[in-house]
Image (cartoon, rainbow, N blue to C red):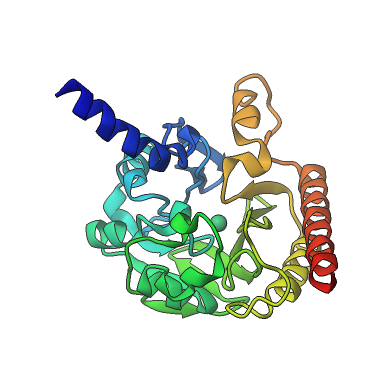
Amino acid sequence: MFLRLLFLASLCLPALAQLPGSWTEPFPPHKIAGNLYYVGSRDLASYLVTSSEGHILINSSLEESVPLIRASIEQLGFKFTDVKVLLISHAHSDHCAGSAEIRKLTGAQYMVMEPDVPAVESGGGLRKSRIKNKADYTQFPPARVNRVLKDGDEVKVGDAAVVAHLTPGHTPGCTTWTMKVDGLNAVIIGSPNVNPGYVLVNNAAYPTIATDYERCFQVLKALPCDLFLGAHGGYYDMAKKHATLKSTTANPFVDAEGYQRYVIEKEKAFRQEWNRQKAAAVR
Ligand SMILES: [Zn+2]
């Protein structure tokens, strides 16, 4: 029996090993500024934008993240069922797999940037062929979309408002969210990353992927940013900044310089990979 369990465990391990522990490790929910709160895990970022008429939740994350997000919202003194609108950074499982469940539990309206809607509503199946290896994060429970968003659209609940910016490449509908809070410009980056296995040259499933990344960086560089935030806590050293919350009166999440540095660094990484693939294609 023990050996059998051991054997079964060994079968499960490769699948488990793909999920970093920081994705499901609880993290103290905290106020970023004004009506903007962090309600995610140590690395999978979820944000709550509150109003007296209900809240906006950005990122449902994994299916197993849903109870954690709920607990974080309640710990801050808000009601999970007051989430009226659900948004995502992009159609990958680490940001949207919990959406079907959150829609069911809260009745929230699910709003998604147009090019990511087919993936969201089909559970990612339509673009399975896009990723060569480790396609897991492109698969998730399908969820119906209530409102299809376009670049520049505003999403409002009461006096809570965020703006959707199309920053494509990582996915065709990858979305960077911005809002004004306490006179500061908050930017929640959707993802500037070129994942392992991404095809930037002659990609039949996503022909405009490389020029989409160029557009993404153009948009990110032009956005005014004081509060540097993103789809993963790791983008902006969330845990490190959070640790200084108690020892400083300055808001540690205000980091305009860090934002610019991050975007430039990511654009450099994209261009290097694009050049590498272009050179390999002509060989
Ligand atoms: Zn992703």
Left or right position of 117 against 1? right
Q: Position of residue 119 (x, y in %)?
A: 44, 72
Residue placed most toward the observer, 175 or 72: 175
Q: Is residue 208 above or below residue 10?
A: below
Q: Is residue 193 above or below residue 168?
A: above
Q: Position of residue 250 (x, y in %)?
A: 71, 31
Q: Position of residue 147 (x, y in %)?
A: 41, 78
Residue placed most toward the observer, 199 or 40: 199
Q: Residue at x 68, y 52 (%)?
A: 183
Left or right position of 11 against 157? left
- Locate the C terminus and report the quarter of the image it occupies: bottom right
- Locate the N terminus and report the quarter of the image it occupies: top left
Residue placed most toward the observer, 255 or 251: 255
Q: Is residue 45 above or below residue 178?
A: above
Q: Is residue 95 above or below residue 113?
A: above
Q: Position of residue 189 (x, y in %)?
A: 64, 56
Count of marks placed on residues: 0
Image quarter for ligand 1 equals bottom right
Q: Residue at x 82, y 44 (%)?
A: 257
The quadrant where residue 167 appears: bottom right
Residue placed most toward the observer, 9 or 233: 9
**Residue 241 appears in the rendering:** yes
**Residue 179 appears in the rendering:** no
The quadrant where residue 221 appears: bottom right
Outermost residue, left side:
1
Q: Residue at x 64, y 62 (%)?
A: 198
Left or right position of 271 against 166? right
The quadrant where residue 213 appears: bottom right
